[in-house]
Image (cartoon, rainbow, N blue to C red):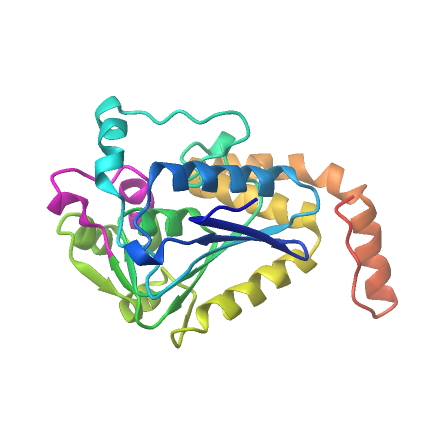
Amino acid sequence: MSNSNILVETRGNVLMMGINRPEKRNAFTLDMYFDLARAYYELDQNKDLRCGLLYAVGDHFTSGLDLPQWGKVFADGKLDLEEGMLDPYGLLEENRCRKPVVMACQGMCYTWGIEIMLACDVRVAANDLQLAQLEVKRGIYAVGGATTRLWNEIGWGNAMRYVLTGDTLSGQEAYRLGLVQELVEPGQQFDHALAIAQSIAKAAPMGVQASLASARQARDYGNRIAMQRIPEFMPQIIKSKDSVEGVQSFLERREPNFTGE
């Protein structure tokens, strides 16, 4: 699936999803949101896909939302998704993509760009990255997860420093604070992110998804609930073909060949 503004391509077990409106600095439209939601659904549902890679074409990840298109959405206070879509922001834990997504970003990464970053699991950035949660400078506020997630990533004071002012956060500072995991030269972010996504895709899919689900539960519902639910994942996994393959490949000193079964 692809159109002029969202590129979707499969490479092995990785689904690559590209923001492709560089002539408008990848300003995010409603149609782009819905197409990205369809791609996330495909990633979630397709058993052959094990990891997503989110990236953007051009010098900038995004200059922000195409605000005239989003006015009615903000006024109504809701955004209805059709069947076959999953919210890329993953605001409802019980209805989000169950597979990990790696993000590659560069240049401007404003408003929704930060919030989609917070919904991704691993982030690689070019060192020219400039982050800004600009909503308070536009008379609105962040509604895609920044108010609930950013402080958990970089600490309360650090998050409020940028959410409440709309000031710019550099790539170097984002790396220092742990918001991005790798900082590379411009133009290298895609390849580095793809390498991470492919490494995730080589691991046992059921193990990866259980690890991600458990970690998300701890983050969203607290350690106690997450610890209580850890035993729920293990019986199905320990009986899987991949579990047998993991042990056998270790004994035979070879790379495992996981099938997700």
Residue at 31%, 57% in the rendered image:
23
Pick whichever, 14 or 123, lies toward us.
14
Residue at 44%, 49% in the rendered image:
4
Task: State the image quarter where residue 173 is shown.
Answer: bottom left
Residue 88 in the image: x percent, y percent?
44, 41
In reply to whether residue 163 is colored magenta, the answer given is: no
Specify start and end residues of the magenta stretch as a single range: 132-151
Pick whichever, 94 or 197, lies toward us.
197
Residue at 84%, 51% in the rendered image:
244
Residue 105 in the image: x percent, y percent?
39, 62
Residue 226 in the image: x percent, y percent?
52, 38
Answer whether residue 138 is visible to the viewer in this image.
yes
Query: Which corner quadrant holds the C terminus?
Result: top right
Answer whether residue 25 is visible to the viewer in this image.
no
Pick whichever, 69 or 170, lies toward us.
69
Left or right for 36, reference 29: right
